[in-house]
């Protein structure tokens, strides 16, 4: 069954998502970053290129020729995913395909609207019996574990 981690309360959700993706890469974990919002995914793509000046986190879009060998995959759907290890959700709702992943990472921003959407996702997962961990942002420095 998928293990779910919520991280709260991120001042900058995309920047924190970059930190999580980089941390997973450092730990040799493979991540799919998901949102159906192509513009948001494009902003994440740009942020991932520039959020740390001294390093690069290899990433590409799902369905491209390098996706099978790339540790961080950017996806607007559940199609053409090269792996199902860690899913980082940037969408407002739960990803319809999340149960096919070992881990699901959810980030909660500090604004009330995002908190309300996160509570709805949390309730959805809890009602279905998923193992959910709630983490303060500071705990993101710990290993992602298995």
Image (cartoon, rainbow, N blue to C red):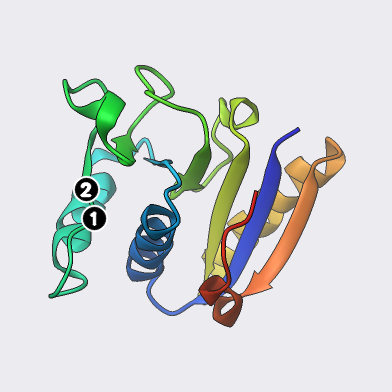
Q: Is 1 positioned to the left or the right of 67 in the image?
A: right
Q: Is residue 93 above or below residue 79?
A: below
Which quadrant of the view contains residue 34? top left
Numbered label tally = 2
Which quadrant of the view contains residue 18? bottom left
- Most foreground residue, 40 or 80: 80
Q: Is residue 81 above or below residue 2?
A: above
Please say if the residues under marks 1 and 2 sit with CB atoms less than 8 Å apart. Answer: yes
Q: Is residue 6 above or below residue 82?
A: below
- Most foreground residue, 18 or 108: 18
Residue at the location (18% across, 60% down)? 56
> Circle 2 is placed at which residue position?
58
> Secondary structure beneath disc 2?
loop
Residue at the location (36% across, 35% down)? 36
> Secondary structure beneath disc 1?
loop
Counting from the top left corner in percent of width and height, residue 73 is at 31, 37
Q: Is residue 68 above or below residue 7?
A: above
Q: Which mark is residue 100?
A: none
- Most foreground residue, 124 or 69: 69
Counting from the top left corner in percent of width and height, residue 113 is at 54, 65
Q: Which mark is residue 57?
A: 1
Q: Considering the image in quadrants, where does the N terminus appear?
A: top right
């Amino acid at each position: 069954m998928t293990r779910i981690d919520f991280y709260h309360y991120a001042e900058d959700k995309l920047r924190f998502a970059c930190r999580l993706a980089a941390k997973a890469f450092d730990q040799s974990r493979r991540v799919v970053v998901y949102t159906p919002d192509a513009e948001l995914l494009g902003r994440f793509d740009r942020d991932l290129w520039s959020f740390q000046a001294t390093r690069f986190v290899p990433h590409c879009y799902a369905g491209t020729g390098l996706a099978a060998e790339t540790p961080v995959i950017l996806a607007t759907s559940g199609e053409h995913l090269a792996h199902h290890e860690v899913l980082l959700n940037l969408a407002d709702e739960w990803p319809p395909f999340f149960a096919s992943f070992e881990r699901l990472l959810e980030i909660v921003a500090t604004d009330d609207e995002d908190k309300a959407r996160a509570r709805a996702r949390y309730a959805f997962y809890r009602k279905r019996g998923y193992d959910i961990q709630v983490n303060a942002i500071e705990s993101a420095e710990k290993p992602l574990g298995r």
